[in-house]
Amino acid sequence: MSPNEQTPAAPTSAPRSLAEALRARDDASLARLLRARPDLLGPVPNDLTQLATRAGTRASVVRALDRLDRFTQQVAQALAVAPEPTPYATLETLLPGEEAARALPGAVATLREQALLWGGDDQLRLVRTARELLAPSPQHPSPTGLGPTIAEATAGLSPTRLQEIITTAGLPTTHDGVSAVAELTELFTDEARMSALLDEAPPESIDVLNRLVWGPPYGQVTAQPAAHLRWLLDRGLLLPTAPGTVVLPREAALHLRGGRAHRELEPVAPEVREKATHRPQVVDATAAAQAYTALSTVEELLKDWDEGGPAVLRAGGLSVRDLKRTAAALDSTESQAAFWVELAYAAGLVASDGEADERYAATPAYDAWLERPPAERWTRLATAWLAATRTPGVVGGRDGKDRTLSALGPHLDRSAAPEVRHRVLTLLAALPEGTAPDPESIVARLTWERPSPAARELRTRLAEWTLSEAEFLGVTGRGALSAHGRALLTDGDATPAERATATARAEKLITPLLPEPLDHVLLQADLTAVAPGPLVRPLADALAVLADVESKGGATVYRFTPGSVRRALDSGRTASDLHVFLAEHSRTPVPQPLTYLIDDVARRHGHLRIGAASAYVRCDDDAVLGEILADKRAASLRLRRLAPTVLAAQVDPGTLLEGLRAMGFAPAAETPEGDVLITRAHAHRTPPRTPPEPVPDGPALPDGTLLDAAIRAIRAGDLAATAPRRTAPTHPGNGELPRTTAAETLATMQAAVMTGDALWIGYVNAEGAASQRVIAPIRVEGGYVTAYDHTADEVRTYPLHRVTGVAELEPDAT
């Protein structure tokens, strides 16, 4: 197949500018451009000339180049060092090899589609800004390692020195510097003559050229260079660019390279290698088990913060001490605790309460989340993770001002995170089911797809974090993507309805894999209860009050203690209630030691009664009060007897309660009416909060409706700007509005209604904004003209007094 057959189709008539190249495109091609470079739509350009100008701005071009893959960047770099315009055949010479030949048409098509390249196959042109960014200079060496051309490098040489160089190189003298540069350039680009010249070079000179040929092309010389360097300088193979600095001209380097623009080409994306293979059923089961663990961990986190979580730092976020405490409560590392905290925050389950003494707490959405089925709760977490730009992996690092980055604090957003997560999971989805990838090959693939040095380090870390976080969350199992994780993936421009469908599909797949909650425990004689699986919520909540969690895992072990039983009694339960509860929910008989423990704590519970005096203790048995007064441990409570059955204290009731409990008593608080005060944990909630909004990575991708509207507006504006006029305006060519008298305007409008012709008008709206429009008048009456506005693509009515002037168009202009 010939090169011309391989290259993508180019416009049949060579465009003279990027604007003309854009004008030759169809709407589908313009839509692909605007989708690839959404920054061009802010705001919508008036016409295609403005679109082309915006596409050539430095900021937009830099962004577009950074988002190209490795080989497409290499193609752009080769075009930047090639003569302009560049024939396709020359580009093939600069990028040799069978794989490069197969990949080159696609890379050229990508550059064309993104308006970084225009022109036919015989006249390929990079946009000027891209060429300036990629062309070599002493301050910014070319990624190709090539230096300036002979014409650029000899710009500061005197004509006499130029004549000396071409004479020493064996060329005839010329009459001016321009022709001398042309002669030297012709010599260096003639393969046979250049080879003959180099055959005469000393071996040391060739060694110098070999060190410079692949870049950087600059070297240092002394005021009295060695003979082998003088040989190169005298023949222009090294040209001075500054005192003591020389450069290898581009034409000489290309000859030494055999015409190659790059030392190594990477036309093919690196493959994602397999690390291990598992049965898909094992992967799905492992991932589902981890997904349930993720739900339990988030619940445990929010339960730990139920009565008000850690304080919010003045600068925002959790303190290091609070993060360590949270990690200990979750039995995890600090980095894992930061992930769970940030995940709950991204899902809208936790936020700051906004009080004067600001603390973190669960949101009202947490209570609603708890009531949903496990599969739905998991997809809520997973979808929040996929879309979140907050990156817990950076917690503990330093920001630009050398401040520590805190969990839930500011400056954790990394706008590339969602795109990297989605891309990593997409690469996993492309592998056979049950296949775990080699993480290094994932990183290598992402680096090839976005090789920009500015983004490489962050994207590498994001990929590593994605693989570990996906495992924590149960999206992957044993390193391989699960079926429910695969179902969550959608295209970047998926509609909300398509995302909802994907979420429902993931819920359906994970539901049968999640363990069913149990309604029973196994009581044991050592005052423990074993839950062989997850418990239904009422049982889990009641057991969390009556017993302390001793160990977690596949089975949770609860331990009954005097303190935990007293906690249950303080919450309003009676001993008989506890006996009935345990009998109903145990698959084993209630052990006698547990029965004795409950009865013993219940018998002593409330024997002492404490209320507010500051505080008092009352007891029907005055001997017990005498025992308390005689105990040296009660000295700090500063007790005194008011009556045989009443002691007064100079501390608050809470302190008195804790003090007596530490002495081994089981007091109960009472209300001012003398009733036992029932205490229940106060669930602190924030006001309603919305989840944090992701920080977009540049302008948002436009949807189909916006693209269609933008393209219609650009086309209409271009029609208004380029349509030929039969009658020239008063100030032709200077960009001002047409000017006609009121009578001329009215007459021209009325004539156009009769003939159906289109008109070019100048119009000033009520805010004073002036514009040019192409209209087809339908009716003129009452000082208004009703017309089809080609610019707005709709029928509109305009006051005639706001029309500054009118000009007729050529019959075929519309």
Image (cartoon, rainbow, N blue to C red):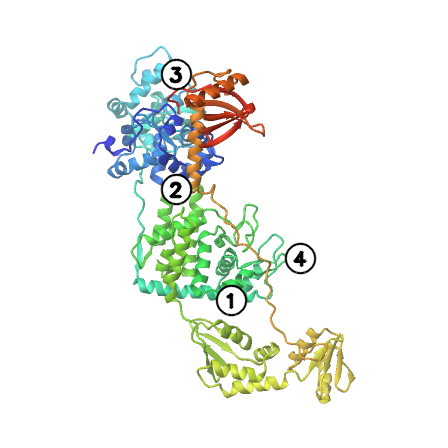
Asked if the residue at tag 1 contacts the one at tag 3, i.e. Cβ–Cβ closer than 8 Å, the answer is no
For marks 3 and 2, give the CA distance.
42 Å
Q: Which residue is mark 2?
A: 451
Q: Position of residue 362 (x, y in %)?
A: 56, 62
How much space separates mark 4 and mark 2, taking CA atoms? 47 Å
Residue 470's quadrant in the figure? Answer: bottom left
Question: Which numbered disc flags the more N-terminal residue, 3 or 1?
Answer: 3
- Near-viewer residue (366 or 746): 746
> Which residue is pictured at 52% across the width and 83% down the height?
580
| Amino acid on which the number 4 mark rests in the picture | Ala
First in residue order: circle 4 vs circle 1? 1
- Left or right of 34? Residue 413 is right
N-terminal of the pair, mark 4 or mark 3, is 3
Q: Amino acid at mark 1?
A: Glu
- Residue annotated with mark 4: 356
Percent across and percent down for residue 272 are: 32, 51
Name of the residue lying farthest toward the left: 1
Q: CA distance from mark 4 to mark 1?
A: 26 Å
Q: Secondary structure at mark 3?
A: helix
Question: Considering only order in the chain, which callout, 2 or 4, is on the residue closer to the N terminus?
Answer: 4
Residues packed near mark 2 inside 10 Å, few (<14), some (14 to 19) or many (20 plus):
many
**Kind of residue indicated by mark 2:** Pro
**Mark 3, other Cα within 10 Å: few <14 / some 14–19 / many ≥20:** few
User: What distance separates the C-alpha of mark 4 from that of mark 3?
Assistant: 79 Å
Quadrant location of the C terminus in the rendered image: top left
- Cα–Cα gap, marks 3 and 1: 81 Å
**What residue is disc 3 on?**
161
Q: Nearer the viewer, residue 30 or 99?
A: 30
Identify residue type, mark 3.
Arg
Which residue is painted at 47% across and 17% down in the image? 733
Q: Earlier in the sequence, mark 3 or mark 2?
A: 3
Q: Disc 1 designates what residue?
A: 300
